[in-house]
Amino acid sequence: MPSRHDADDTTIRQQIDNIVEGIANKDLKGLRRLYTTDVVSFDVEPPLQHVGVEAKLRNWTAVFTVFDRVSYEVRDLTLTVGDDVAFGHAFGRLSGTLKDGTATNGMWVRATFCFRKIDGTWLIAHDQVSVPLDIRSGRGVTDLQP
């Protein structure tokens, strides 16, 4: 028997697909529609947190200025869905062709998404992207595969 949250699970997965599509199309307007206005993002680049949708869009703008063609792959997305909040985790990878013509496979990162259902729409209220840390060297490990 389907759970009462199956439809929401499907909708949230579509929102993640919309991120993938928005990145591939470099569609800042489309990406804006996926986040709450007060989203808090713990992304891989400094500072420690990016607060608000404008800060999140500046992150995507920075990506788009580096890549000529870009894609985002999501693997192993797992979701837990409640009535008006949900969270999920996955592995993600940006890859593509840089502005100088160099092709890059990018690196796999760990991604966490936290959603709020606002006026019937599931929006990202928090995301976090990270790489494992090699404690001895103090450096991120960026060559791991899921």
Image (cartoon, rainbow, N blue to C red):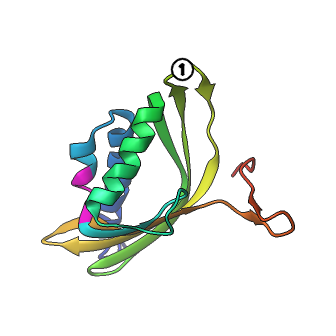
Q: Magenta part of the protein: which range?
A: 32-36
Q: Position of residue 95 (x, y in %)?
A: 55, 35
Residue at position x 71%, y 50% from top?
142
| Quadrant showing the N terminus | bottom left
**Is 61 above or below relative to 119?**
above
Mark 1 highlights which residue? 100
What is the quadrant of residue 87 in the picture?
Answer: bottom left
Residue extending furthest toward the right? 136
Q: Nearer the viewer, residue 126 or 77?
A: 126
Q: How many marks?
A: 1
Q: Where 25 sits versus 125, above or below?
A: above
Instruction: Identify residue type, mark 1.
Output: Asp
Is 117 left or right of 82, judged from the image as shown? Answer: left
Q: Residue furthest front?
A: 47
Tell me which residue sits at (71%, 63%) in the image: 132
Question: In this orientation, which residue lies closer to the viewer: 136 or 3?
Answer: 136
> x and y percent of residue 82 in the render?
34, 80
Q: Residues within 10 Å of mark 1 (few under 14, many from 20)?
A: few
**Residue placed at 40% from the left, 36% from the top?**
64
Q: Is residue 130 magenta?
A: no
Residue 68 in percent (x, y) is at: 44, 25
Left or right of 21: which side holds 144? right
Residue nearest the observer in this picture, 144 or 101? 101
> SS for tag 1?
loop
In magenta segment, residue 35: yes
Residue 14 visible within the image: no
In the displayed orientation, state which residue is furthest to the top. Answer: 101
Please tell me which residue is depicted at 81% across the width and 70% down the height of the picture: 135
- Regarding residue 87, the answer to whether it shows in the image is yes
x and y percent of residue 124 in the render? 32, 65
Query: From this viewpoint, which residue is outermost toward the bottom?
Result: 83
